[in-house]
Image (cartoon, helix red, strand yellow):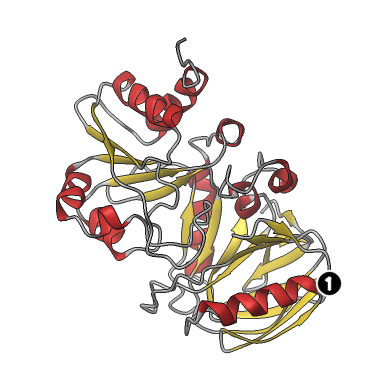
Amino acid sequence: MFDLSSVDLLDAFTRELRLCKVRSGEHVVVLSEPGSRGDYVAAAFGAAKACGAHVISATVPGGSPAPMPSTHTGAGPGLVSVLNDSTAQDLLKSADLVVDLTREGFIHAPVQQEILRAGTRIIFVCDAPDVLIRNLPAEGDKAEVQEGVDLLKRSSVMRVTSDAGTNLTVQLAGAKPEFQCGFADDPGRWDHWPSTMVLCWPEISDGQLVLAEGDILLPFKEYVRDPVTLQIVGGHIEKVSGGAEAEMLSMFFEDAQDQWARSLSHMGWGLMRTADWFATAMYGKDDLMGMDARAFAGNFLWSTGPHPVLGRESYAHLDIAMRGCTVSVDGTEVVTDGQLTDR
């Protein structure tokens, strides 16, 4: 019997690669590991052909050095088989576009920066099929997130508050504002399908973050049931208090044995209007990375662990998506009570 599972995905992958500006004669590498979805490999391969590109499907051995379960977390450094193999790295550096279908990607690995400096574009894909199709980006998404980046670049302070008790002041000097728009169309660009968000990498933030019921803890892929209060001093979590989720976070920080586990990393807000807050509840934990949670419109997303601006390498990476926050940048509200502000 024929396996036709990739047919329904071919159109979506073709549209995605066209957003990534794949042109006739370019070279596309579809990178996978044995645990990658075969229908994604086939769809990406067919999409590259449909765009007129030269395409190579490269499957490398699985296995991550990260000391934590690999369940689509986005926290690890990628595959040992690429990290330790200069031939594999040279293949990726020689491509115009890499479609990264590995389970963890190389988001926090220095080797990815080397590949990008060679001019390679990388699009990372790992969520469930209907998540990809429902959240297929539009060309105009890039201009919208760029507006948020420009605002952060010319501003000095971001404030985050909520009725639950969050009150955080973030210093933006040197915070290197960035964005994700769901496609990689510029040389040396990495992006993540799906994703639409504005983020930055501040060093100093002070105050408190209060996680309310329904906020989402990633990579645990769990919803908060009891409020959690985190006291922030100088960009570091000094105290965690609350119910069961507070205990889980405290244990994670301790068990990580990582000096940066309690240090804040990137933070920003989501603009993906097609994303569903409840999507995390609809799938098994191994089926998705959780980009609905990370990028749903009006969220406040903050993280811990790695910080490329400060040169911090860490596997202790949490992403926490909060609802109901007000985010203001030098007094301009970009999110009001969890809703995007039409500026």
- Asked which quadrant contains residue 249, the reply is bottom right
In this view, 265 is above or below 8: below
- Write down the residue under mark 1: 164
Q: Residue at image x 52%, y 68%?
A: 317
Q: Secondary structure at mark 1?
A: loop
Q: Position of residue 282 (x, y in %)?
A: 72, 41
Q: Residue at image x 61%, y 51%?
A: 295
Q: Position of residue 96 (x, y in %)?
A: 23, 40
Quarter of the C terminus within the rendering: bottom right
In this view, 127 is above or below 176: above
Circle 1 packing at 10 Å, graded few (<14), some (14-19), many (20+), is: some
Amino acid type, callout 1: Ala
Q: Residue at image x 45%, y 27%?
A: 39
- Asked which quadrant contains residue 115, the reply is bottom left
Q: Position of residue 26 (x, y in %)?
A: 21, 31
Q: Which of the two residues, 84 or 47, is positioned nearer the viewer here?
A: 84
| Residue 171 seen in this snapshot | no
Q: How many labels were placed on the picture?
A: 1
Q: Residue at image x 53%, y 79%?
A: 261
